[in-house]
Amino acid sequence: MNPTYICLKTIIMDEKIKRNRETIKPKWTDLYKVNSAKRQGLERPKQFIEVDDDTSVISLVNEFPNIRQKTLTEVIAGRRSLREYDSKGLSFEELSYLLWDTSRIDSYRENAVFRTIPTAGATNSMETYVFVNSVEQIESGIYLYLQNRHKLALIKQNDGLKDMVNDALLKQLRGASAVFFFTCIPSRTEYKYDFCAHKMIAIEAGHACQNVSLSSEVIDAGVCAICAYDQDKVDSVLGIDGVEHFTIYCATVGKKKH
Ligand SMILES: Cc1cc2nc3c(=O)[nH]c(=O)nc-3n(C[C@H](O)[C@H](O)[C@H](O)COP(=O)(O)O)c2cc1C
């Protein structure tokens, strides 16, 4: 008998497991019967987060003269989860590069966004926040990456922030120089794909984490993907509501120790 079959038979499947499995196998053909927000002609959710004019904003660089590129084969072969980081931190150019390769938007129009990562139906569910711990020229704090402007907007700075981030990550900060928080605004994708949206939103964040992992390899850094975090605490530290906008994936980043 197939061992997988035995395993499935012995699981006592509770309702939560059943329900969660359903979200990763939505019946696409049922989507055509649903009166989605788009079909109803409702207003499309905003594609980007706007910040107030008085928000402190840092322009990142989009040329990387000090970064020696590697081949794709090299970076794929080199990638391993990294959970111990060198204390020297990232340069301004390196953080700019990681965001440029991971979360930037190449172009957009009223109903579509095109970025470095694929986004389901060009709906762009994802936002990126960064906790800067140790990056040259950037003060420690929580920043929102303005993805269509390649800038960082300061969200929060205070003395206890590092401990709060570490606590929210269930003690997995591990001295990383930066943490990428991939958040989602589900309504952007639900607008078009209704109950099918949630699987795609999660996959989109996975694409982003892969990009930050591979681009980190280029700069002799490494990443640890993190899903085991305290949802409420992470959302609260980023200043997002946890309902219409919440964290879906995190990635600690830092230089390799030699
Ligand atoms: C979706 C996802 C969530 C993960 N969450 C965590 C986490 O919370 N903490 C952690 O230390 N590693 C986490 N990891 C890293 C895995 O443990 C790691 O990828 C696995 O052990 C394989 O090792 P490798 O990445 O070096 O190939 C996660 C990986 C993925 C793909």
Image (cartoon, grey):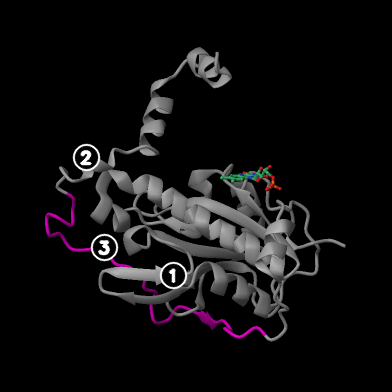
Relative placement, left or right, of 241 versus 256 is left
Please give the count of numbered marks on the rendered protein.
3
In the picture, which quadrant includes the C terminus? bottom right
Q: Residue at x 39, y 50 (%)?
A: 200
Q: Are marks 2 and 3 in contact (CB under 8 Å)?
A: no
- Type of the residue with mark 1: Arg
Q: Which residue is mark 2?
A: 30
In the picture, which quadrant includes the N terminus? top right
Q: Residue at x 52, y 13 (%)?
A: 10
Q: Does 98 appear above or below 181? A: below
- Type of the residue with mark 3: Pro
Please tell me the numbered disc located at residue 194. none
Task: Characterize the local packing of mark 3: few (<14), some (14-19) or many (20 or more) Cα atoms within 10 angstroms.
Answer: some
- Residue 239 image position (x, y, % from top left): 46, 59
Q: Which residue is mark 3?
A: 45
Q: CA distance from mark 2 to mark 3?
A: 23 Å
On whether ligand 1 comes within 8 Å of the CB at mark 3, the answer is no
| Residue 124 visible | yes
Specify the segment rendered in magenta. 36-64
